[in-house]
Structures are given as C-alpha cells and as structure tokens.
C-alpha cells in the first residue's frame, strides 16, 4: 500500500513538471499552419485571447496517466487480496485463541473438581484409618476372647473324655440289664393291649347297634318335627291363600290327603322353567299358524322371545330364584343356538362332524345330536364378541319384592349398634361368664369355654325385642305369658315402639310376674329383659329403631307394597331408591332432623306425611348416645 502511494506521488510530480514546461513552451508563438497545433480563440467584451495547446503531448500524458492508474489499480487489488488473506489469518488465530482459552478454562475446572475429589478422598482415607484402628483394637479384644474360649474348650474336652469313659461303663453294665427289664415289661403291655383290643371289638359292635338306633330315632324325631312344623304353619296361615284354595279343591275333588303335597310340587314344577318353555312354544306355534303371520310372512320363534326377555320379578323364595336361574340358562342356550346355527350350516364339510350327526328323517326338524355341536359353535362365537355385545345379548335382571332391602337395612344397622355395647350372655353362657369382668373380651385372659360363650352371646336392642317376643308372644302356647298379655310382637321396630311407649307398664308387668311365682324370682330370660328395660344403651337402640322405622322403613314399605302399587313395575322404583339414599344421607349429615325436640314429619320422614309417633319426649331425647348411633 505504501509502495502504491509512493508511485502515485511520483507520477503526480512528473505530470506537474511536464505540464509546467509545456505551458511555458506554449507561451511563445507557434506555427499556426502546423497540423499539430490547435487554435482556440476566446472572445471577451474587451479583447480576444488566443491559446494554443499541443494535442499530441496531451494524449501522451493521458496515456501515461492511464497506465499509471492501471498499475495503481492492480497494486490496490493485490493489496486488497493480501489484506483479505491477512484478515482471514487473524480471524483463524482469534478463533484458535478462543478455543484454547475455552480448553484452558475446562482444564481449570477439571483440575478444581479433581482437587475437591482429592480432598474428599483424603477425608475418607482419614476416616478409614480411624476405622482400621478401631477394628484393630476390636480384633485384639476378640483375640483375647478367643484364647479364653480355647482354654475353656480344652478343659471341656478333658471333662468329655471322663464322661465318655463313664458312658462306656454304663453301656457295658447298666444298659443290658435295663434292656432285659424293659423287654419283659413290653411283653406284659402287649398282652394287655391284645386283651383290650378284643374287648374294644365287642364294644364296637354294641356301639354300632346303638348308633343305628340313634340315627333311626333322629330320623323319626325329624319327621315328627317337620309334621309339627307343617301343622303349625298350616294352623297359623303360613301358606299362601292360593295354595290353600288349591289344596282345598284337590281334597274336595277326591285327592288323597297324603298326595296333596306331591301334587302341589308337581304343579310347581310345571309352572317352573319347563312350564315357561311349553307356554312359549305353544304361543309361538299358535302365532305362526295364524292367518296374520302367514299373510305378512312373519315367523315368531322361542329364540325371539328369549331375546326380548331382559328381566324377571319375584319374591325371595327358593323356587323363584331357581326359576330365574333356569330362565337365564334357557336364554343363554338360545343365544348359543342363534349364533351357532349359521356357523354350522355354512361351515366347510368335515368328515368327523358329518359322521357324528345322523341324518334326520325330516328336513324341517334337525337331529337332536346336532344341538351339542350348535351349542359349542355358539359358545365359541359368543366368547369372541366384545364385552358390550355380550352384555347386550345375555342381559337379564332379577328384581325381588324390595322388602328384603328394608330387612337387610334393619339387620345391618342393628349389628353395628349391637357391636358397641356390652354383650349379654344367655342362661347357659351366664354361668360360664359369671366370674368374668364385664366387657373383658381379651382372648389371652379368657379360657376357651369363656371365649366361646362371649362369641355366641347376643346383645343390643334387637336381642331385647327378641326376648320380649319370646316372653309375650312365644310360638309355643305353653310358654310365656299369653294368658295375661295379648300384644303380638311381629316386627322388631314395632316391638321397640311398643316397649318404649309403655315402658313403665312392661316393667310393672315383669315385677308382677316375678311376685306371682312361688320362689319370687325371674327366669333367666325375664331377668335379661328386665335388665334391658333399665339399660340406657339398649333403650337407645330401641329408640333408633323407632326413628328409622318412622323416617325410612314404613314410608319405603308403603311406597313399594302399599295401596295403588298393583300395577307398578320395579323399573319405576329407581327414582324412589335414589330418593331413599339422599334422605338417609341427609339424616346422617343432619341428625337433628329426627333428634331435635321440635322435629316433625315434614323434615324427618321419607314421605313428609307420616307422623313421628306419640312417644314420651323425655324418654327419647334423654337417652345417651342417640346421636352417635
């Protein structure tokens, strides 16, 4: 760059000197006729001025200037190239320096981490040295203990050698003599055992005969008990009025008295699943043979009927449950038949299956042996269906009479309440638990008999109501106080209502029964009832039963089985059950709806109409634990 500058300066100086010399020469007269001269005339206002310039010399100067400028441009271009190369080199050196700086920083950080690790290692080494010193001290201690144990073992070894000598002496002298004595005694015992075995065989024959007689007596007793139970059921009206009417009609028609039961069983079987099948078959055949079916080319099969069967309603008796299970099985059989028949008819020929299925004499009626294969195909097709489709096909719901819901609610609530109180033993268990502290149920402090007595003993308000029913309305007319009391105890909640309403009267009645006896004492059952009527927790349970019956139980039973429910379907009871759950939860959250002294039917009962009852207010609201129960 400096060289280019110097060259340009030299050219400028040379150009100036040449120009000055030429101007000096141009000041003299030139040949006007010369071809190399140019005459330029300049006219002004005052006088003309003439200038003559030599064109050739000017062209030479311009060429020289152009050459010089071109050289300068070349020099500038080369300088720029060199400058760019130098700039790239500088940039590369700067990037290299940055990389080296980064590497140095990373190395510095690694060195710092290594230094920290070395310090940590030094600390661990110091700790390990301390541990080694402790282990060394402990090893010295255990070495001393080992030496002591070795000395003890040597002493015991000497003693064992002496004992071995004594044992050898015993084996050689005493044991043979004792063996002879034991053999003799074993022979005597064997003889005695043989005699006892002979006696036992004779006793076994006697015991076998007695057991056979006992079983015969038990069977006879069971027969008499069943006859007595049936007679009492017949007398008390335990059988439905329809069966009474059927039995009466059979007897009047000349049926033997002993055959009435078997006839009723046969009728029940006919009205079961087989009866349903026959009825459905009859109805479908009648429809298929009707002009309406033939005119519209519509056919109704039992399979179509079971497809529409989605629910069965009945009570909780065993025959109803058995009928429901039979209908469910029949529905599944028809589902398998519907799914398996097309698969069997469109399946490729199979020699094994063709041989197993005999040829039917009538093409309209398939052979009976093909049912098993159709059922198998149908089950396979049913198993591969999605769960949603399976549920849509085999859905069948059994609905009961809804009365067991109320029964189970009372039963479960009574069990939870009874678990809170002290257990009340019966007559047999009272003697066993007489010396046991009340409420002591620890299995470690009680014997097996006492523990068993605690487990089987009843307690609670339901137990008290059961005792009251056994005393005042016993199923045996010879027991209880039927001649002096005619109140019928049929429901636990009603019993609780009766006992709490006339609590003082029942206590007076029990006292009168006691004083009318010769020994003037209670029986065990009467004593338990007397204690229960004076026990606040038991009375609290009775009050809870009353509140539940008035608030939930009786309104629910009235809605389900009351007047105007003859045409009601179980599907219509869904909103009622939702309402029952909400009402029960409302009482749980706000017990004052029932327990408050100003509670009324509009807030406490399910139907908001039933009265809460005319019970002594001080009796109910003064009972403890009523809110918790």
Image (cartoon, helix red, strand yellow):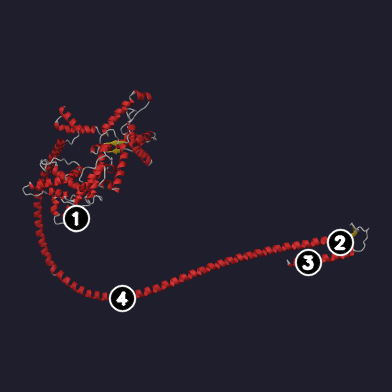
For the image shown, how many numbered marks are present on the structure? 4
Label 4 to label 2: alpha-carbon separation? 123 Å
**Where is residue 399 drawn, in percent x and y?**
28, 38
Q: In the rendered view of the protein, which quadrant contains the N terminus?
A: bottom right
Q: Earlier in the sequence, mark 2 or mark 1?
A: 2
The residue wearing badge 4 is 141
Q: Bin the neighbour count of mark 4 within 10 Å (Cα to Cα): few under 14, some 14-19, many 20 and up.
A: few
Label 3 to label 4: alpha-carbon separation? 105 Å
**Where is residue 598 drawn, in percent x and y?**
26, 46
The residue wearing badge 3 is 9
Q: Earlier in the sequence, mark 3 or mark 1?
A: 3
The residue wearing badge 2 is 57
Image-based side of 329 in relation to 191, left or right: right
- Is label 4 or label 2 in front? 2
Q: Bin the neighbour count of mark 3 within 10 Å (Cα to Cα): few under 14, some 14-19, many 20 and up.
A: few
**Where is residue 569 drawn, in percent x and y?**
30, 35
């Amino acid at each position: 760059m400096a060289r280019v500058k110097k060259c340009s300066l030299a050219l400028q100086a040379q150009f100036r000197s040449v120009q000055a010399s030429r101007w000096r020469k141009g000041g003299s007269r030139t040949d006007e006729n010369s071809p190399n001269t140019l005459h330029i005339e300049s006219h002004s206002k005052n006088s003309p001025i003439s200038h003559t310039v030599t064109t050739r010399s000017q062209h030479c100067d311009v060429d020289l200037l152009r050459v010089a400028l071109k050289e300068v441009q070349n020099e500038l271009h080369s300088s720029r190239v060199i400058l760019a190369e130098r700039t790239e080199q500088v940039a590369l050196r700067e990037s290299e320096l940055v990389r080296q700086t980064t590497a140095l920083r990373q190395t510095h950080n690694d060195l710092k981490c290594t230094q920290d690790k070395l310090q940590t290692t030094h600390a661990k080494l110091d700790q390990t040295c301390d541990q080694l010193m402790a282990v060394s001290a402990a090893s010295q201690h255990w070495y001393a203990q080992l030496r002591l144990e070795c000395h003890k073992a040597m002493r015991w070894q000497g003693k064992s050698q002496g004992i071995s000598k004594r044992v050898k002496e015993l084996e050689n002298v005493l044991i043979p003599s004792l063996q002879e004595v034991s053999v003799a005694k074993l022979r005597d015992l064997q003889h005695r055992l043989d005699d006892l075995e002979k006696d036992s065989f004779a006793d076994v024959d006697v015991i076998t005969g007695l057991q056979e007689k006992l079983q015969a007596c038990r069977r006879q007793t069971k027969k008499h008990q069943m006859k007595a139970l049936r007679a009492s059921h017949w007398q008390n009206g335990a059988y439905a009025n329809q069966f009474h009417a059927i039995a009466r009609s059979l007897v009047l028609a000349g049926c033997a008295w002993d055959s009435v039961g078997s006839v009723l069983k046969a009728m029940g079987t006919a009205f079961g699943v087989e009866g349903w099948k026959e009825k459905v078959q009859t109805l479908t055949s009648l429809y298929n043979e009707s002009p309406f079916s033939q005119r519209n080319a519509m056919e109704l099969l039992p399979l179509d009927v079971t497809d529409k069967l989605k629910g069965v309603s009945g009570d909780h008796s065993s025959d109803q449950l058995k009928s429901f299970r039979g209908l469910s099985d029949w529905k599944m059989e028809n589902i398998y038949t519907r799914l398996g028949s097309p698969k069997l008819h469109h399946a490729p020929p199979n020699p094994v299956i063709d041989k197993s299925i005999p040829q039917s004499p009538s093409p309209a009626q398939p052979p009976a042996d093909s049912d098993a294969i159709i059922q198998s195909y149908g089950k396979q097709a049913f198993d591969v269906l999605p769960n949603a489709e399976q549920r849509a096909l085999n859905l069948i719901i059994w609905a009961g009479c809804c009365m067991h819901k109320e029964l189970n609610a009372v039963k479960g609530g009574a069990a939870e309440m009874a678990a809170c109180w002290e257990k009340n033993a019966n007559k047999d268990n009272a003697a066993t638990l007489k010396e046991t502290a009340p409420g002591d149920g620890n299995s470690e402090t009680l014997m097996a008999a006492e523990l068993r007595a605690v487990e089987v003993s009843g307690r609670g308000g339901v137990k008290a109501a059961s005792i009251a029913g056994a005393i005042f309305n016993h199923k045996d007319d010879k027991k209880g106080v039927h001649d002096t009391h005619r109140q019928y105890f049929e429901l636990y909640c009603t019993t609780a209502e009766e006992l709490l309403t006339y609590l003082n009267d029942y206590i007076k009645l029990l006292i009168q029964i006691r004083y009318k006896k010769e020994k003037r004492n209670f029986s065990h059952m009467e004593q338990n009832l007397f204690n229960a009527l004076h026990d606040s927790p038991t009375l609290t349970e009775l009050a809870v039963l009353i509140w539940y019956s008035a608030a939930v139980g009786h309104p629910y039973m009235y809605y389900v089985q009351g007047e105007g429910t003859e045409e009601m379907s179980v599907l219509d009871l869904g909103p009622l059950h939702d309402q029952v759950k909400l009402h029960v939860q409302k009482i749980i959250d706000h017990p004052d709806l029932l327990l408050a002294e100003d509670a009324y039917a509009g807030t406490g009962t399910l139907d908001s109409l039933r009265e809460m009852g005319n019970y002594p207010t001080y009796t109910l609201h003064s009972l403890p634990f009523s809110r918790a129960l």
